Each structure stands twice: as C-alpha cells, then as structure tokens.
C-alpha cells in the first residue's frame, strides 16, 4: 500500500502532501491484523502467526487490507498479542491454531472470539480493547504512543500517524534557539538515569567551542530487568531518529551516533532499516527537507560491557577503545567524542522530543510533578502479576503502579520491596509505597530513577542475596580503572558471600558501610559512585535480615542454602517415596504408608526433595 | 572468501577508520566465528596500530572470543529477574553436566555457553537462547532437555581434527 515509494521530499510541504495522500488511501473501515513482533511476543512464536495470517488472507481474500508486524504493546505477560481492526479488538496469548478462527470470525465475520480476550481475574469480566484492561487504563503514552500501532519497518506508517511533522515544523518555522528554548521550558530531564535537564545540556553543547559537534543516542541499555529502550528502538525507531535530527538542528551538529547494546539484534535491524528509509526520503543526509540543514546518523553495536552505558565510557567505545570512563570534571558537552563537543541523551529522551516540538513546552510541562515533567516508561517485572512495559505520568505512586497496573504480587504473596534504578539503584520497602515516583523522591529514598527498571520482590526474596547478586554483577562489570570500584566491590562481595553462607561475623555490617562510603566518595564514574547502593539501601531498610543471617545463621526468606532446613509435613506426606529415591545424600527414610523423615545431620540442603515432591509436602523451615 | 581477503574487505568497508575498530572486529568475528590471531595481526598491520590495541578491545568486551565457538550457541540470561526465578541453578547445572565454563565451549565442541546480563525479555524469565531461538520460562529440566537434544554434526569434528 505504499505510495510513490522512492519519493524524496524536497520541502516540508512535500511531506504534508504525502501524509494527506497516505491518509486518504486508508479507509477507517479497513480491516487489518496487527501482530506484535517485539522480542517478548516473537520469542513465543508471533512471527509464525504473522505468516499464517498473511497466508489466510491470500486464501480467504475478502476486503482485508493487511496483516502488519508491529512493535511491543507492553503487555508481554500476555503475549503473543494480536489486535484486529476495526474495533481495536485485543487478543492475547494467541497460538497458531487460533489464527484460522480469528480470521474467520473476527476479520471476515466481524464477531469477537471471546475466549482469546483478556479476562480480569478478580471481576471475571472480559475486556475487548486495550482501553478496558486495567494494565493499560492508568497509563499515559507519549513515547510508546505508536508502539504496537505502526509497522516499525515502514516509514509510511510513521508518517501516517504524524511522524516527522515535528521535524518539518522545527526546520521550517523555528530557529535553532527556539527549539532549544522549547526543550528547556518543557522541563524534560534525561531518561537514562541522571535526570540532568536536557535543554541545559543541549545549550552547553551548542555554546561549546569547537567543530564538529556530535549528538549521540545512548541505546546501551545495560540494566538487567530493563527493556524500555529496546522496545522503543524496536517498535518505533523513527521517533528516536526524528528526535535526534531535531536535537542536532538545535545544537548545530551534522553527525550523530546511535550506540546499541550487543544483545539487541532486532533493535539494530530496525534502526538500520529506519535510517535507510529516512535517507531515501530526504529526512536524513544532505539538505534535509530542502532546508539546507544536513545531518546523518551511524549505528554502532556495543560489545557487551555494562560500563559503556556511562557517557564517557560509551564515547571511548565509539572511538574504538575499551570502554573505560574518565573523570567527570572535563565535560563531554565540551570535550566528548574525539575531544569535540558532544551531546549524549538516552533513547527515551530523544523519543520525547518530537512530541514536545509538536505540542509545545507548556503541554509537556503540565504533565508530571514540579521538578519531573512528562511521563516515564518503566519495565515492571519480577514477582508481579502483569509483567510488561508501562508508561505513566511522573508522580504516580508506587502503589498504583505495582498494584493497579501490575495487579499486585504473583501468587498472592506479600510485597516486600521494589528495586528501582538498575544494579546501582536501591530497594524500596512497603512503607514507602505511597511515595510519588519522580527523580527527586526516589533519590531521597536512597534509590534512584535510573533508566526505569522496576523489579518487584515478594516475601520469598532474601534481600541479602539480592544485594549480593547486584554486587556480584557490578564487580563483574567494573572496568577496573579506579581502585575503589575494582577492589571495594570485590571486598564487599566477599563479605556478602560469607554472610549468605552463614559465615558472617558481627563486624561485617560496619565493614560494608565503610567500603560503601568510600565508593560513594572516591570512585571515578557515576557507576562506581552508586555501586554500593544495593548494599546501602538494603542495610537501611532490611538490616534485620542481615542480622538474622549473621547472628542467628538464619535466612528469613528461606532462600540462602544452609540457613534454613527442609522438613516433611507429617500430614501432607503420602509416603510415595519419590523424595527418598531422589535424595542424593540418602538422608530420607520412611516405609510404605508412613510419613517420611529427613535426617538433618545427613541433609545437604540441596532441595531435590522439594522439587520432586508431587504433594508439596516438603517444607522450608 | 580467502583468508587474506577477509580483513582487507572489512577494513575497506569502514574506510580504515580506527574509530570503527569495534565494528570491524565484530564483522571479523561474524565472518570467522571468532577472532583468529593471524587475522587480528593482519588487521593491526593494515590499520597500522599495535596488536595490543586489538587485544585490549577483544578482552575488554564480553562478546568477543579468541577461541573457536561450538557448533551451537547457547545464551542463558542471568539478569535480575531471571536470577530471581532460578537462572543461577540452571547455569550451574549446565556447567556441571556439559563441563563448560561461562564463556567457554564444551569439550566435544557441541556448544558455546554464554551467560549474559539481561536480554531484555524479563516477561519471559528465565530465558535461554539457543541458536537464536528463545525459550521462555525454562526450568532446570526443560533447559537440559533442549541441550541434550542438540545434534553434534560429525563433519565439524573432523574439520576440527585437521587443524
């Protein structure tokens, strides 16, 4: 359904004319099937679903317009997700055999297939569209507005929903200074972690001496448990590119870089595609939209190093060197990539820019809290019912996010903490669930916004073990350049390892705190300075768990091996003998029809009996 | 492509710009499956930089490997969510049963094993990726089931033997 495919726009008016043409061709009654091919749905076989729909259309005919591959809808928990137009009917957990039924009933017949709709567990009501599902209801989508709606590989789709109109507006009607002022007044702050005012960064870069100037998009989303940027790059790559071109215009840059994580092959593919299409259309390259402004973008894939998410390390990597950060007193806006003024923003920050230019600074500034404007995308994961990607206005409380949108803790367990801000963030306990989420509030709690990972933990999670996990992660990923981070983390991990193995000593907590403080003060880069956060925040809120490990040699969450026992419930045991057969230590005894018993002296606490028991009769005590 | 031409072609692709060293090495790895030392030497000569410069990059970034990879590629996510859901135990079991180290290859060359920090598919945790195919919600049993069924191609073993 492309119109005049190879057309290059030589003026902003050409773009508008093309958009009109596209919209006129799309009838509101057109029947389309949108299949999500984000990493989550694709892993569950959604590409095959797409092929089956295409095949069904060829054979079934009718007046079907198209089957479309679209980016992540966010509701990964319920994937693969298929949306049918008209009516926006959302089908979840679609499997291959369902395709024929959806095609026959909904696409051709206009009837709804009830059993594939989302059903609310509490009310037993079925939701026909996304808007009726609690997961989506409380969200406000700016960055993710078109995710799940457009085909990320089609620039026409992006243009049809208003894409590149902000670029045309900026180039044709605004001076670079006006764009800068708009971004400054909007109150947009960097979405990558630091929360630095974007407009101020842009201005510093523009005012810096030296040419050329570079703009860089940080797509090295290294925080485990976070996939906001992946979904934006995969689902709506043009929004990122458009934001970068507008930024480059405001700053006076002609060369941009997108640095994408090695683990995100689909994001790289979609960005490459998008850059190619934008060049063909005259939206990227020389003389953009015939306005005389030139700018181009290059993609670099990361090498799999967490530290490269740090701006100076990322630039070192772009120069083809190991990604080691350098001291921050030399600002990258003045001396960045190749020692030239460089402006680096995160994927989500760039993707906000077109909406700000289009709708104005006041519109954006009206959303959110006093000092954190707009929305934030979070990946809501862990022990939560509705896992997925959400976008909410800044200032929403943790409780609304985790319980209203997320549906609470899985399996009816108690909520213990939510970990925000990635590995160097912190764990926030239940008493702060009503705190509004924004940059400053989270920092006050000893955590941080970070890039937007939110990992929900239940009563079954041991906080000492969580701290150990993150410390191990950071120790592994430490680049090794500065001593506090390289040696401090190793020592902290060593102490935590002892504690979780029941070998903790009374003075250990004091040692952890001392090393943590040294890291905060003396480490070279932001990653090192915050690397003690997981330990410090769990010490702050869950000190009694540390004490239980150290003093009583007991793990309250019953997770640390050796710090709790396995016992067989007398009333639950059916004497089937499976545990006895599988026990590698031959610690279980019991005859036919009599409840089995674990000999605690022989037991190695491997947990095999718990795994093998079909009656859940093995208990952790 | 003949061995000597690989490096030449890759370097030309990036106009010999040293800033593009990482992409060049990524392309070399894509072409050879790993970074053979003779090819790295060739690339260093061609770019007129010391070999140590390339070695620094190859050993800093986890995605580069200096030894041949196995016939299959097994990636196990050990990010936070996968960790909470038991990826650690799965990793331990794989390493034990197949006698493979993290980042290494099984003795029979069946597969290379790479635990990674988050593939960004947390809704599917724990996630294992085998030759590009995602397995979601894996358990110790299901993961081992997939790996035990991986076919070992006999001709590849012969080729290894020749070297």
Image (cartoon, coloured by chain):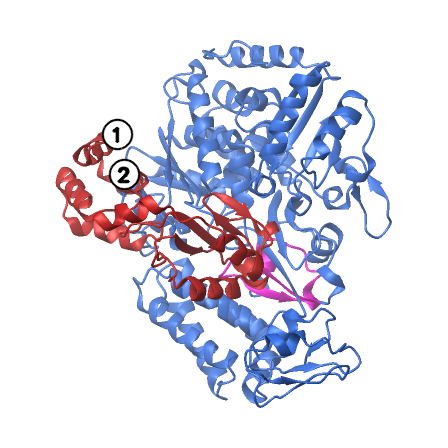
Residue sitting at x 66%, y 40%: A366
The numbered dot on residue A600 is none
Can you identify the residue that label 1 sits on? B13
Can you identify the residue that label 2 sits on? B24
Report x, y in % for residue A200: 46, 42
Q: Which shade is chain A?
A: blue
Q: In the structure shown, which secondary structural element does the residue marked by tag 2 occupy?
A: helix
Q: Is residue A424 magenta?
A: yes
Residue A409: tell me if it is visible: no
- How many marks the image carries: the answer is 2
Q: Please, is residue A148 above or below residue A408 in the view?
A: above
Residue A288: tell me if it is visible: yes
Q: Which residues are magenta?
A: A415-442
Cα gap from disc 2 to disc 1, whole angstroms? 8 Å
Q: Is residue A122 left or right of residue A616?
A: right
Label 2–label 1 contact, CB within 8 A: yes
Q: What subunit carries mark 1? A: B
Q: Is residue A476 left or right of residue A464?
A: left
Report x, y in % for residue A495: 44, 79
Q: Which shade is chain B?
A: red
Residue sitting at x 73%, y 58%: A408
């Amino acid at each position: 359904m492309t119109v005049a495919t190879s057309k290059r726009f030589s003026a902003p008016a050409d773009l508008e004319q093309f958009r009109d043409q596209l919209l006129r061709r799309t009838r509101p009654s057109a029947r389309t099937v949108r299949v999500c091919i984000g990493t989550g749905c694709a892993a569950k076989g959604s590409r095959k679903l797409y092929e089956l729909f295409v095949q069904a259309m060829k054979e079934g005919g009718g007046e079907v317009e198209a089957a479309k591959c679209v980016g992540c809808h966010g509701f990964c928990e319920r994937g693969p997700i298929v949306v049918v137009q008209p009516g926006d009917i959302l089908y979840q957990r679609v499997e291959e055999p369902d395709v024929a039924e959806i095609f026959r009933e909904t696409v051709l017949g206009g009837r709804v297939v009830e059993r594939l709709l989302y059903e609310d567990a509490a009310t037993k009501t079925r939701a026909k569209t996304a808007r009726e599902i609690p997961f989506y209801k409380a969200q406000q989508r700016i960055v993710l507005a078109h995710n799940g709606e457009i085909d990320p590989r089609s620039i026409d789709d992006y243009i049809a929903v208003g894409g590149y109109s902000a670029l045309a507006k900026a180039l044709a009607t605004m001076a670079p200074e006006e764009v800068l002022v708009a971004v400054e007044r909007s109150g947009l702050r960097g979405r990558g972690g630091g929360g630095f005012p974007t407009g101020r960064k842009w201005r510093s870069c523009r005012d810096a001496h030296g040419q050329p100037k570079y703009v860089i998009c940080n797509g090295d989303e290294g925080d485990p448990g976070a996939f906001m940027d992946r979904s934006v790059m995969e689902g709506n790559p043009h929004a990122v590119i458009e934001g970068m071109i507008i930024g480059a215009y405001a700053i006076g840059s002609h060369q941009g870089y997108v640095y994408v994580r090695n683990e995100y092959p689909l994001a790289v593919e979609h960005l490459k595609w998008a850059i190619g299409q934008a060049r063909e259309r005259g939206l990227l390259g020389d003389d953009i939209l015939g306005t005389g402004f030139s700018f181009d973008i290059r993609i670099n894939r990361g090498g799999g190093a967490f530290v490269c998410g740090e701006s100076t390390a990322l630039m070192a990597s772009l120069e083809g060197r190991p990604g080691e950060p350098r001291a921050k007193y030399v600002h990258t806006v003045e001396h960045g990539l190749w020692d030239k003024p460089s402006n680096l923003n995160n994927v989500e920050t760039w993707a906000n820019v077109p909406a700000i230019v289009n709708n104005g600074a006041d519109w954006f500034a009206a959303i959110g809290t006093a000092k954190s404007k707009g929305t934030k995308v979070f990946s809501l994961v862990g022990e939560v019912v509705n896992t997925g990607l959400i976008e909410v206005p800044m200032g929403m409380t943790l409780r609304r996010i985790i319980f209203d949108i997320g549906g609470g803790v899985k399996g009816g367990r108690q909520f213990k903490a939510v970990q925000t801000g990635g590995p160097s963030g912190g764990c926030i306990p239940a008493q702060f669930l009503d705190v509004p989420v924004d940059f400053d509030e989270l920092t006050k709690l000893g955590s941080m916004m970070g890039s937007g990972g939110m990992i929900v933990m239940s009563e079954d999670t041991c906080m000492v073990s969580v701290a150990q996990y993150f410390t191990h992660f950071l120790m592994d990923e430490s680049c090794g350049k500065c001593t506090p981070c390289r040696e401090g983390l190793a020592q902290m991990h060593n102490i935590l390892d002892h504690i979780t193995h029941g070998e903790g000593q009374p003075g250990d907590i004091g040692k952890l705190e001392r090393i943590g403080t040294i890291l905060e003060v003396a480490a070279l880069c932001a990653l090192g300075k915050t690397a003690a956060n997981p330990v410090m925040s769990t010490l702050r809120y869950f000190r009694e768990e540390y004490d239980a490990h150290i003093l009583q040699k007991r793990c309250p969450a019953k997770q640390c091996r050796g710090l709790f026992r396995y016992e067989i419930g007398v009333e639950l045991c059916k004497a089937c003998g499976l545990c006895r057969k599988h026990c590698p230590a031959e610690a279980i005894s019991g005859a036919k029809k009599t409840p089995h018993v674990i000999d605690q002296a022989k037991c190695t606490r491997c947990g095999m009996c718990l795994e093998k028991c079909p009656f859940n009769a093995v208990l952790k005590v | 492509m003949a061995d000597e031409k690989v490096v030449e072609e890759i370097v030309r692709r990036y106009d010999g710009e040293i800033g593009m060293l990482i992409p060049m090495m990524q392309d070399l790895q894509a072409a050879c499956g790993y970074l053979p030392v003779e090819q790295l030497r060739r690339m260093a000569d061609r770019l007129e930089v010391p070999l140590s410069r390339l070695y620094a990059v190859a050993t800093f970034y986890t995605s580069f490997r200096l030894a041949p990879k196995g016939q299959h590629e097994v990636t196990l996510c050990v990010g936070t969510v996968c960790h909470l859901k038991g990826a650690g135990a799965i990793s331990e079991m794989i390493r034990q049963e197949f006698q493979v180290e993290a980042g290494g290859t099984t003795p029979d060359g069946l597969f290379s094993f790479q635990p990674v920090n988050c593939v960004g598919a947390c809704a599917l945790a724990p996630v294992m990726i085998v030759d590009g195919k995602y397995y979601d919600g894996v358990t110790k049993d299901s993961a081992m089931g997939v790996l035990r069924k991986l076919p070992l191609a006999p001709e590849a073993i012969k080729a290894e033997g020749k070297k």
